[in-house]
Image (cartoon, grey):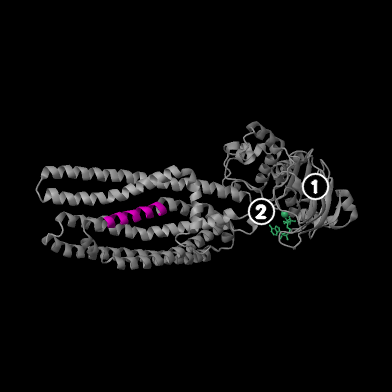
Amino acid sequence: MAQITGKAFDTKIFSRVMVYAKPYMGVLYQALLLTVFLAVLGVLRPYLIGKAVDEYVVAGDSQGLLTLTLIIVGVLFLEAFMQFYQTYYSNWLGQSVTIDIRSQIFSHITSFKLKYFDKTAIGTLVTRCISDIETIAQIFSQGLLSIMGELLKLTAVIIFMFWVSWKLTLYSLAPIPFLIIAMIVFKNAIKKAFQEVRTQVSKLNAFVQEHITGMSIVQIFNREGREKAKFIAINDEHKKAHIKSVWAYSIFFPVVEILSAISLAFLVWWGIGGVLKNEVTQGDLVMFILLIYMLFRPIRQLADRFNVLQMGMVGSERVFKVLDTQEQIQDGGTLESGIKGNIKFENVWFAYNEEEWVLKDVSFEAKEGETIAFVGATGAGKSSIVNLVNRFYEFQKGEIRIDQTPIRDYRLDYLRKEIAVVLQDVFLFSASISENITLQNSRISQEEIALAAKAVGADKFIEKLPGGYDYDVKERGGMLSVGQRQLISFIRAYVYNPKVLILDEATSSVDTESEQLIQGAIETLTENRTSIIIAHRLSTIQKADKIIVIEKGGIVEQGNHQELLAKNGHYKRLFDLQFKESELS
Ligand SMILES: Nc1ncnc2c1ncn2[C@@H]1O[C@H](COP(=O)(O)OP(=O)(O)OP(=O)(O)O)[C@@H](O)[C@H]1O
Ligand SMILES: [Mg+2]
């Protein structure tokens, strides 16, 4: 978590935030105008009340008093009305800006290379998209306009007070220096406390997120008790941090209260004398008492508002940092047709991290319509090879061509449209089965989905689910088995009808019935299209046109099943190993 180093007001960040308010300038101006009106109206009421005392109460003119009272009530209603609109507009503005920034940051994040996500915590990005942006909304709803409003009110009150009686004003303002000192102390204390609270909140978030995701491990190893103890410890820190901020508030507010009482005491003490000496009127005195309240309330609020503004600045800074990150995949290609399905790797070298070669000098060719299979030990580099074909990651040396053209010359969206990838661990969104198959592509009809399901042999199990194709698979497809999820991803690939299919078989074993289903589905899917299959069960690939054995990032053997068995090398060894395993079971 980044430290809060921000100033309460950073012009560079602020002007960048204001760019987002541009489309809503009309509303911003209205809110500003209302703020100004409210400041002026605020002073009007005490003035009228003072007048009422002087001209009607003292004179005993009840008719006049009634009229003025009605006017005062009217002003009160007008104030309430304006207050409503001001609150509404400023919050509306905040939320509108939030939507815009949020959509921008979301689409920005989705354009990043996978490499970026390898090194960035999910929790951090979630925080940027949700709570950090929330603090930007508060700049508008509670920070900026409120601060302006309170400052305007303060200025109006003070000018008005001097205008009525400078002597009374000076008396009643005597405790102000102490107030300013109290404000500064409070502001610093609360800033530190908030910082601490935010750090603790993010720790809590991370802990809960990690433990719910890894719940099965917690339970398998009977860690509930110990994890709970850890959780309580973090909670305790969180509580302490919170209490610190409560302390600051619970001291500051009474201090302001006392200072305003002292102010009032000065005022009354000198004021009564002044009235007796006919230097001020009774009405002025009443007016001042009301004004004193109006003076102290904004001051109390201001200290708080500055914190909101500062939090907003910090939030903005973090959000802008993500927006300024340039980790996009270079999409410089222009070709958007012509892929038939010939894939050729020419001396490809690849590393996830500088110079730690995961693939070393890999060359092979998959001709149009062929099925190529990769086998090898875990960590050998099989998934890494297929990660390069649709440009999930960028290789460093050599060339990958599809139909003789380097893959970087194709437009990225076209390339990915023609290459369907079924990943090793299938990810499903919490939505219906149909939505998980079409992925919001409205051009795919229900009939097509049903036909595809039938083709890959998944129709029976889907129809048995409550609601069939409308069945909600819940978060990450947690309601389905591994084999079922794999079948759904097959339908996904089938309906998109790509020229190239890449299939990274799930390592987890599935039951015999699912295995047969999956086997059949793979045969259907690979028909008439170039297919690259990474198989963990060698039974899956015996019919492949070519089997390539990968070891430590390099190709050690290739040929078809019979040829490789005859070679009596790496493949034969793997085959014997699995054969023995299945005999044993
Ligand atoms: N995102 C990544 N960042 C850094 N290194 C990675 C990343 N993914 C994989 N690796 C490393 O690259 C090497 C090859 O991994 P790869 O996933 O290609 O193996 P695999 O052959 O698919 O294994 P498995 O059969 O277990 O799926 C491994 O040493 C692994 O640690
Ligand atoms: Mg793999």
Residue linked to disc 2? 114
Quarter of the image holding residue 384?
bottom right
Which of the image's four quarters has the C terminus? Answer: bottom right
Quarter of the image holding residue 281?
bottom left
248 with respect to 269 (left or right): right
Q: In which quarter of the image is ligand 1?
A: bottom right
x, y percentage for residue 570?
84, 57
Q: Give the range drawn in magenta.
A: 143-159
1 or 2: tag closer to the N-terminus: 2
Helix, strand or loop under label 1: strand
Residue type highlighted by circle 1: Arg
The reply to whether the C-beta atoms of the residues labelled 1 and 2 are less than 8 Å apart is no
Main secondary-structure element of the magenta-colored stretch: helix
Circle on res. 401 = 1
Residue type highlighted by circle 2: Leu
The count of marks equals: 2
Q: Does the residue labelled 2 lie within 8 Å of ligand 1?
A: yes
